[in-house]
Amino acid sequence: MKNRIRARIWLIFIVITAFYACEKDNQNTEPDVIPDQGYINGIYIVNEGPFMTGTGTIDFLTRDGKKYQNIYLTSNNGQVLGNLVQSIAIIGNKTYIIVNNDNKIEVVDTKTFQKSSTIENLPSPRYIISPGNNEAYITCWGDNSVKIINLNGFEIIGSIPVNAPEKMFNLGNQQIWVLSQGGLSVDSTISIIDVASKSIVQTIPVYPQPSGIQQDINGNIWVMCTGRNAWHPGGESEGHLVCINPLDYSLIKDIEFPEKTLHPEELEINSSKDILYYRYPGGIYKIGIDSAMPETGPLISRPNGFYTISYDPYEDILYGSDPLDYTQNGWIYKYNANDGASIDSIPAGIIPGEIYIMPVAY
């Protein structure tokens, strides 16, 4: 009997070993090589890294399927980014890497990914956006503010109080719409900053935890409001998807989700600007801008859901990430945005928290 058990254990070991060997062969990674054309025309995978320890990393995925691991370390003589890598953005010919817990932004040349500058003393930065005037806006949780920096010398030239600021949207290089979602400080407002005056010109009340924002083909603004979670002292609340007229800030549409305990998050829009995608328990859902209620079933079904999603308008593809147990390397999954068909699975780093689609024209 013991021999049979040992034989079965050995057989299982062989099968598992073969499986992981096959997975490794299919990863198509080139960790120590810089592409001849540089890091352009592809997708950044932003791995947060272990919470409060270690370092985050960034991987690069080319459109022909090659993956380059930890490109910041490769391009900067073994330097690490720090903890925790929150987000990334391309402004001009530079890529700005937000390192939240280390209160800084690393600035690199987009093509080579070699470091050129560090912007320091930012209190828990989250996201960066530029209206195209040699300035950039940075949401900061540490002091509930939006910092304004000059992109020439990287000095802070302004600070606007905004409670729990998170993601932003650039409306015509004239306004910056700031979602107040915030960590434990759940908010339910949108602050609109006028770029010319560098001041808040409108505060729009919405529903708790606005977590995604997009503009549709008609020029209207859509905002996904996740709702309060069960731990919140105000009690759990349902999600809402709202549509706002950017001319007078009036509410055009309010789509309420049916379950208080199920919370929609994030918001992506297709290349035609008429279909929205969002995360919801069980997968990725879609909704047309003319719809009156949410879809009853997912476009992409996945029982464990996704940690984050992203839409690639150049190839009509949806990406979703899975951090597994938040301590081991996660995965990125790739799907057809029209029918939800699975295309590929790609290994990532620890906690893949953002999938950034580079502009093809870069």
Image (cartoon, helix red, strand yellow):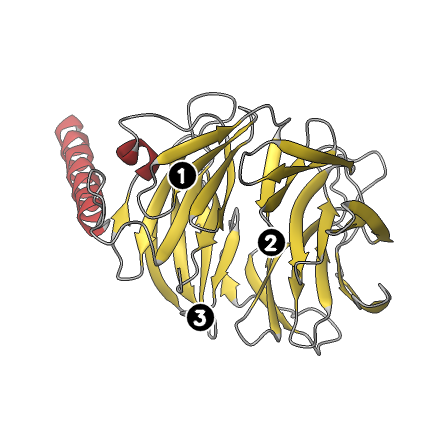
Q: Secondary structure at mark 1?
A: strand
- In the rendered view, would you say 94 is above or below 319? above
Q: Is residue 229 left or right of residue 281?
A: right
How crowded pointer 2 is (Cα within 10 Å; few <14, some 14-19, many 20+) is rated as some
Q: Could you tell me which secondary element the residue under label 2 belongs to?
A: loop
- Residue 226 seen from this side: no
* Front residue (pair 187, 100): 100
Callout 2 touching callout 3 (CB < 8 Å) = no
**Closer to us: mark 2 or mark 3?**
3
In percent of the image, x 43 and y 60: which residue is there? 359
Residue at which label 1 appears? 108
Relative height, residue 4 to residue 290 (above, below): above
- Specify the amino acid type for callout 2: Pro
Q: CA distance from mark 1 to mark 3?
A: 28 Å
Secondary structure beneath dot 3 equals loop
N-terminal of the two: label 2 or label 1? 1
Q: Position of residue 192 (x, y in %)?
A: 78, 52
The label nearer to you, 1 versus 3, is 1
How far separated are the C-alphas under marks 2 and 1? 36 Å
Mark 1: amino acid: Val
Residue where numbered disc 2 is placed: 281
Nearer to the camera, 91 or 103: 91
Tell me: residue 86, above or below residue 249: above
Q: Residue at x 33, y 54 (%)?
A: 40
Q: Which residue is mark 3?
A: 316
Q: CA distance from mark 2 to mark 3?
A: 23 Å
Q: Residue at x 65, y 56 (%)?
A: 170
Residue at position x 46%, y 74% in the image: 339
Mark toward the start of the polypeptide (2 vs 3): 2
Kindly identify the amino acid type of the residue bearing the numbered disc 3: Asp
